[in-house]
Amino acid sequence: MKNTHLLNLILVLTSTGVLVSFVFLIYFYCKRSAKHEQQDVENSEQKHEDDVKVEDLMTFQDGQDLRICDILDAPGEVIGKSNYGTLYKALLQSSNSVRLLRFLRPVCTAKVEDFGEVVQLLGCIRHPNLVPLLGFYAGPRGEKLLIHPFYWRGNLSQFVRESNPDSHKWAIIYRISVGIAKGLDHLHTGLEKPIIHGNLKLKNILLDRHYQPFISDFSLHLLLNPTAGQEMLELSASQGYKAPELIKMRDANEETDIFSLGVILLELLTGKEPINQNPTTPDEDFSLPNFMRNAVLGHRIHDLFHPGLLLNSSIDDELPVTKEQILKFFQLAMTCCSPSPSLRPNTKQVLWKLEEIGN
């Protein structure tokens, strides 16, 4: 009988021990699984963050606070379109800052390995009259995004075309002209190798609140494939900015940039379109430089500048102007637009002449 009780006791204790061990093993397994699951999630999130930071977003000076999720989620307003991309005004929520985002269509861009060095170079360029590149994003479907500061007065085309009374003031015309020339001079002479803009025009010059000009889109054609680059040149030609000798965008050089600068100076001085799209007489069917040459030959001096330019100057104490200064400015612009590239001044000579005119 004792042996039976002893056997039952042993069985009870053994069963209890097995049950406790079994419960302990289940608890340990569940805890270990939860820990591994949490580590997997953390590793996955860390891997995603690393992928975005390392592979997708490249930042430069003053763009270190950019985050790709913030950029892609930012509410944006379309402010410009072209065959090769779209321009957005975007509000970045985390920093409460407004940025200019240029989206390049995948079918129009070169391969990443073909322009990685170009992006690095453009990201290092800094000058008071050049729009800086703050960041660059390459998406999984081939899309490219250039991130820039936003300038509140918009582009120079809006300033000239929208009858802004300030566009008839010599002090502002002169300030903008000098700023553009300084920015272009830095691209041509201020770097280890010259940077050719390739598409200089009013729409690619932005203005801040104080009418300080900033050249944008310099060397953008280097980020495009040959077809898109040539389309950019054809558009430039239709708008009146293309130098007569320029056939292929890849052949753009300092002299072709100077021709475009001359057209811009004429636009600032006269307020006229580079090409008259709706001529009423045969004499008006010219590009702006040709129209100006014919104005001189026909002694139509009133066509050379804004009618109220001298009148406005009489009440503009900041920088008064004489008719002689205006004519010298006009002559400089026309020299920049010379049909012969060898007769065009370089950027240093343009700056010297502008300084002479301003004194």
Image (cartoon, grey):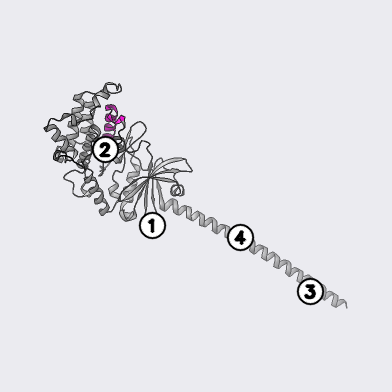
Please name the residue that numbered disc 3 is placed on.
Answer: 11
Q: Secondary structure at mark 4?
A: helix
Q: Nearer the viewer, mark 4 or mark 1?
A: 1
Q: Secondary structure at mark 1?
A: loop
Mark sitting on residue 184:
2
As for residue 177 lying within the magenta part, the answer is yes
Q: Of label 1 and label 2, which has the lower sequence position?
A: 1
In the rendered structure, the answer to whether residue 10 lies left or right of residue 317 reads: right
Q: Of label 2 and label 3, which has the lower sequence position?
A: 3
Which residue is pictured at 61% across the width and 60% down the height? 34
Q: Nearer the viewer, mark 3 or mark 4?
A: 4
Give the distance between the C-alpha atoms of the residues marked 1 and 2, in whole angstroms.
Answer: 34 Å
Please name the residue that numbered disc 4 is placed on.
Answer: 34
**Image quadrant occupied by the C terminus:** top left
Give the distance between the C-alpha atoms of the residues marked 2 and 3, in whole angstroms.
Answer: 95 Å
Q: Nearer the viewer, mark 4 or mark 2?
A: 2
Q: Amino acid at mark 3?
A: Leu
- Tags 1 and 2 touching, CB below 8 Å: no
Q: Secondary structure at mark 2?
A: helix
Q: Splitting the image into 4 quarters, where does residue 253 fall?
A: top left
In the rendered structure, the answer to whether residue 142 lies left or right of residue 278 reads: right
Give the distance between the C-alpha atoms of the residues marked 1 and 3, in whole angstroms.
Answer: 68 Å
Which residue is pictured at 41% across the width and 53% down the height? 55
Magenta stretch, residue numbers: 165-186
Q: Between residue 249 and residue 274, name the one nearer to us.
A: 274
